Amino acid sequence: MPSTAEKLQHTANLRATRDYRNYVDGQWVASSSGKTFENRNPADHDDLIGTFQESNEDDVNAAIDAAHKAYDGWRLTPAPKRAEYLFRVGEILRRDKEKIAREMTREMGKVLEETKGDVQEAIDMAYLAAGEGRRMYGQTTPSELPSKFNMSVRMPLGVAGLITPWNFPIAIPAWKGMAALVCGNTVVIKPASLTPLSVVMLAEALEEAGLPHGVWNVVTGGGKEVGEPMLRNDKVKVISFTGSTAVGRDISVACAPSFKHLHLEMGGKNVILVMDDADVDLAVDGALWGAFGTAGQRCTAASRIVAQAGVYDQFVEKLARRAKSLRVGNGLDPKTDMGPSVSASQLKTVRDYVKIGKDEGASCVAGGSPLTEGDLARGFFHQPTVFADVKPNMRIAQEEIFGPVTAVMKCDSLEEAIEIGNGVRYGLSSSIYTRDINKAFVAMRDMYTGIFYVNAPTIGAEVHLPFGGTKETGNGHREAGIAGLDVFSEWKSIYVDFSGSLQRAQIDTEEM
Ligand code: UN1
């Protein structure tokens, strides 16, 4: 008898298991290593999605050479023309949204509604970048001298190396990729080894859109074998990485000697502040979605909540009750609220932190255990877990867990809530629930995070605003929005003197 997992996979009409290749210079090619690795469904490890190339330095260098060769042609293609390819990619992704989302749920685990959102984010980004092809504004500004014209324009950098994570397997590659391409760069992308198919599907869309060969290249494999050679290669002019702070630091060090441009988007320990005057039910809705959406595997996840004393007990009781009622299972099942952790090691991290929280003396008021009944034994499932009575200095309130665990703390005032909120080494996202507009504006001013929400959880960024964070979350850059173009371009200031004589700036100007 087929299991529920098998039945779901069957009705979803998923791709047959197969051997996937790298995409280099417009061709689907095998790695020179002759080796492959397996990609399995985190909700059902008996389900083999396919094998992918376990690439090496030679493969990476070949892809970089192809991107380098394609660069001049792409750079000199007018930006509105480049944008037309991206618009077509948006159309293709829109047509295939449901199909791509189902494959993504199978490879990453999050529920179908969320993987559809992930594809939608890639579509949004394709359209945003396509529109930008006809803008990409620089500045024109008067000169201090007569008969002289001043302006600034964006220049592309060359080959962009993208190293992307598994939690938003197509949205984040699209954030980086669409911005890189519209600016005129060519791309080599190394997808996370847990979710290579999503980036292969993105490459298929780019191929169908008719992108010139070599402009977009995909090389799958490990960080050491594929990522590191990218950092060493002088033809790569900019690296954009999303992942852990520890890996981001190593990348930063590796890029420093050659002054490679570098954009880092790293950890988060995001916080929701719930004030005494908040709509508590709304705050519970937000906390539930923020903490357990994507099984907590978002950089923006609401992994901390600070509730004011007057609503603390009520908030904890309601959140715990709602967390216990979430249905955990295969993300292809429409009845499922929350899918699995992405891998055995991610599940182990969750289990380790649950133990740490208990040992630290926090009260586990919901969840706290892995789920292994029936079909669930074939995946990496864990209960949605709520800790209460957490102290701000506990490890569960300081360290990124990247799983379905949230830590609730008590505070007496807005000032204390903000102090606790800012008291971590990360600064990606924060939010406040309050009906008092003054409190909302104080928190908006004083929370030192790159993203801030009022009466909404810490997740839910839209593609046309800058995305990124402060402190150890980032290195001062933002992606998405117009700000994302700054990572993949640099400014050229241009002065045209049409006076026919030598005019010296700062010197040949009349004193007032
Ligand atoms: C991430 O967590 O890495 O705002 C990206 C959000 C999503 C993007 C998250 N739109 O949660």
Image: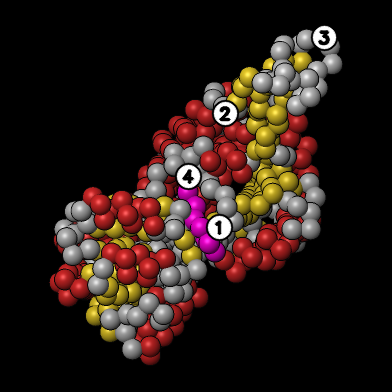
Which of the 4 image quadrants contains residue 185?
A: top right
Quadrant into which the C terminus falls:
top right
User: Residue 474 bears which disc, if any?
Assistant: 1
Q: How far apart are marks 3 and 2 (CA)?
A: 31 Å
Query: Is residue 17 among the parts visible in the rendering?
Result: no
Q: Which of marks 1 and 3 is nearer the N terminus?
A: 1
Classify residue 113 as left or right of residue 490: left
**Residue 205 coordinates in the image, percent (x, y):** 53, 38
User: Residue 466 bears which disc, if any?
Assistant: 4
Q: Identify the residue at image location x=70%, y=53%.
A: 30
Residue extent of the magenta highlight: 466-473
Classify residue 319 as left or right of residue 27: left
**Residue 422 coordinates in the image, percent (x, y):** 42, 66
Q: Which of marks 3 and 2 is nearer the N terminus?
A: 2
* Of residues 136 and 332, the one drawn nearer to the viewer in this rendering: 136
Which residue type carries mark 3?
Gly
* Of residues 337 and 33, the one drawn nearer to the viewer in this rendering: 337
Which of discs 4 and 3 lies nearer the camera? The answer is 3
Classify residue 363 as left or right of residue 68: left
Which residue type carries mark 2?
Met
Quadrant into which the N terminus falls:
bottom left
Query: Is residue 313 among the parts visible in the rendering?
Result: yes
Q: Mark 3 highlights which residue?
A: 500
Q: Is residue 261 above or below residue 323?
A: above
Q: Distance between the residues labelled 1 and 3?
A: 48 Å
**Residue 194 coordinates in the image, percent (x, y):** 53, 63
Majority secondary structure in the magenta region = loop
Q: Mark 2 highlights which residue?
A: 136
